[in-house]
Image (spheres, rainbow, N blue to C red):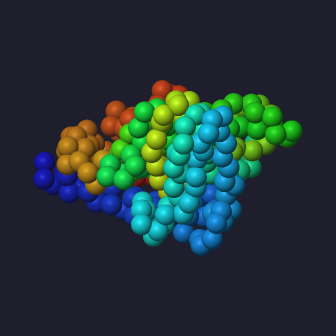
Amino acid sequence: MTKAILRIFGIFSVVLILSIPVYASDNLVINPGFEESGWPPASWDQWDGSTGSGGVSGSISTSVAHSGAQSTARALWGTGGRWGGYTQDVAVTEGDFVRASGWLMSKSDNDPLADGAEAYIEVKFLDSGDSELEVYSSTPLTEASTWVRHVIEEEAPEGSVKARFSFILSTDDENASGTAYFDDAYIRIGTAEDLAYDHIYYEMDKYYKESLDFTVRAADTLSNTADVDISSYVTISDSWRSKIVTTSIGQRR
Ligand SMILES: [Ca+2]
């Protein structure tokens, strides 16, 4: 068993080390980590509105960051229906598979999200006239949390020319309150196969680093072959699971 684990360790180490810089350069978001100075955040549109007597303020945080030294924040103030966020567009073609993600958190000791506040990421697909074709949102953060990654994986529908990515804090509840922090936006566009691989490698990287169990299970299954049905090891949304059957770990690129 030890020998088998070491063998798997070797395979995964090589693949992961090679793959990380490739994927980092594939991110289409500009200023994804909000590290550039100035307000509003460079290359992002910031927006807000309300139906009540309050609003959603925005700022750059230099004290809270998922990576680097800065993130962006949104804070609910006053009362009523309120919304605000940060948006960036990426060009797409219908049929593209889009994988978008971003990191969100809310501090437990300083204005945590409460009473109906919702922080999430959103992807809108728009046509050439800027009409909305489809809108997808992540499951919202509604209370204090450490950094958590939100992901949306969807296919650009017929007529799409752009994907509009947003970090959003909003509420329909009169007395909602709280501050949300956003960092490290990521958008990748490719074929279904490209993005399935991307997803596998992210999950492998996460499990590999955090779980000895994953290493042992992988070793048991792989034994002396590099072919494995990796879908049994990773959590993938239903729409993506069908894209992944058998992946040859050692033969990518
Ligand atoms: Ca950052």
Closer to the camera, 12 or 107? Answer: 107
Answer with the quarter of the image where residue 10 lies.
bottom left
Residue shown at the point (36%, 62%) measured from the top left? 14
| Location of residue 142 in the rendering, given as x and y in whole percent from the top left corner | 42, 37
* Residue at x-position 62% and y-position 39%: 53
Residue 28 in view (yes/no): no
- Residue 227 appears left or right of 132: left
At x 69% / y 55%, what residue is drawn?
Answer: 45
Q: Quadrant of residue 246?
A: top left
Is the residue 234 above or below the residue 56 in the image?
Answer: above
Residue 41: horizontal and vertical position, in percent?
Answer: 63, 63
Residue that protrudes farthest toward the right in the picture? 129
Q: Quadrant of residue 84?
A: top right
- At 59% across and 42% down in the image, what residue appears? 54
Q: Count all numbered tags in the image, as a single digit.
A: 0
Asked if residue 160 is positioned above or below residue 209 in the image, the reply reads above
User: Outermost residue, left direction?
Assistant: 2
Extreme residue toward the bottom, this view:
37
Q: Is residue 94 left or right of residue 56?
A: right
Rendered location of residue 18, percent (x, y):
44, 64
Residue 145 visible (yes or no)? yes
Q: Nearer the viewer, residue 14 or 198?
A: 198
